[in-house]
Amino acid sequence: MTAEIAPAAEAVPFVEEWDAELCSADPLDFPAYESPAAADESVRTGVVDLAGTPAALVACRFDRHGGTMGVVAGERIVRAFRRATERRLPVVELVASGGARLQEGMFSLVQMGRTASAVADHAAAGLISAAVLRSPTTGGVYASWASLADVRAAEPSATIGFGGPRVVAQVTGSYPPATSHTAESAHAHGLVDALVPRSDQWGWLTSAVGAAPAPPLAVPHGRPTVRRHTEADVAGAWAAVTRARAAHRASGLEWAAWLTDGWLELRGTDPGVRAGIATLDGGRVLVIAMDRHANPHPGPAAFRLAQRAIRLAGRLGLPVLTLVDTPGADPSPPSEADGVAAEIARTLLALAELRTASVGLVVGEGGSGGALALAHTDRLLLLRGAVFSVIGPEAGAAVLYRDAARAPELAASFRLTAGELARAGLVDAVLDEDAAAVRAAVTSALGAARPGDRTARPTRATASALAR
């Protein structure tokens, strides 16, 4: 399947085209190879207008020499990223490529490293890039600048993969199955963030770089819809735990939808954590939401998605909002083998190193390090019906008493209710469970939080707990 620049791209012409005169000198004097004229090269670059926002465009067309990246394509891409960095422009990419241009040999291959360096400089300047991968996107282009975009979409049914089918067959002895090397497979494995049909690609790119609002976050049918809880306070810690776990209570995903106006998904493979570049009262914020209804025990992949989101927020200068709801991370042998402890540690480290403000909101149960991984924030808020403890009471009772039936007794000893945690100075505020009031409180907290406050609260609490 081949792909061309969408008709929509022609309706949004270059405001300014760059380096249109560059052409190759055929550096290998390759047999039967005729260097394309400058106008026939695979890559064009320049400035486009996205809803009033200028952006640099890198457009790679498969119908021009297979979209391959030779010296001209590489040089145009490098210069485009450098100009975008100098002018502080976002970069958008439309990609369809068979990979490196074989007829230009190593001169072609080294463009992978050159383009990666140019992307790195653009990213280090705090600028965003977004790519749409069309069919096919393979080889050295997929393994360099196209995969380094901050957010990535693919066209449905596109061929997407490092090795094209013929290369796979030559190396492995058989062609890849129909379910491999597809846009759908890349999406299922978290390699692209969205599947976007041709007609919607310019709109997606415009939203991705913040030039237009993204659509609201869609919550699966059948989820809790009550935005306001007015139940009377329950008596006892175990009753509070039971209430926090109730099936009718909203989890992080529902709260993410209620607290934001637009959502651009960052794709993960563990449904226990969702992440997105969201809009809240006109500003962009990176939201990471635990979803207890989809998977109550997030595993290593969930924390890797959180790390990606946190680091992207720090680089783009965006605040972070986390929504916490889990009895604990997945302790199973597969999770252990995949490094769940290290991923929790790296998530804590990502928040510790974050140079922008962060706010955590516990909307249900906070259990152990799996919850704290997203709660090491500059401001930490709890809904009145939420709880937070060092470990889930059942697991704690199994450890301390070898009897999970003693969980209700242990819950009281943990002092895990919202009020108890606030009195201990372990959280900053307890919020009534009304979506409008919570939204106002979160917005205020994002404005008041200062990077580094995340260590002050636990340090004060630690000091109060030391014997004198």
Image: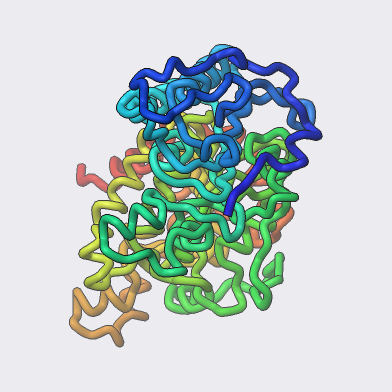
Q: From this viewpoint, which residue is outermost toward the front? A: 32
Could you tell me which residue is drawn at 34 percent across and 30 percent down? 109
Q: Quadrant of residue 29?
A: top left
Could you tell me which residue is drawn at 55 percent across and 42 percent down? 96
Q: Is residue 390 above or below residue 231?
A: above
Report x, y in % for residue 185.
Answer: 47, 62
Q: Quadrant of residue 330?
A: bottom left
Report x, y in % for residue 14.
Answer: 73, 23
* Numbered marks: total: 0
Is residue 387 among what the camera can see?
no
Report x, y in % for residue 268.
Answer: 46, 57
The one of 77 and 107 positioned closer to us in this rendering: 107
Is residue 25 among what the camera can see?
yes
Q: Is residue 466 left or right of residue 437?
A: left
The one of 460 and 377 positioned closer to us in this rendering: 377
Report x, y in % for residue 275.
Answer: 53, 52
Q: Is residue 352 left or right of residue 338?
A: right
Could you tell me which residue is drawn at 33 percent across and 29 percent down? 105
Q: Quadrant of the N terminus?
A: bottom right
Q: Is the image coloured rainbow, by chain, by secondary structure, or in one colour?
A: rainbow
The one of 249 and 431 positioned closer to us in this rendering: 249
Q: Is residue 363 above or below residue 361?
A: below
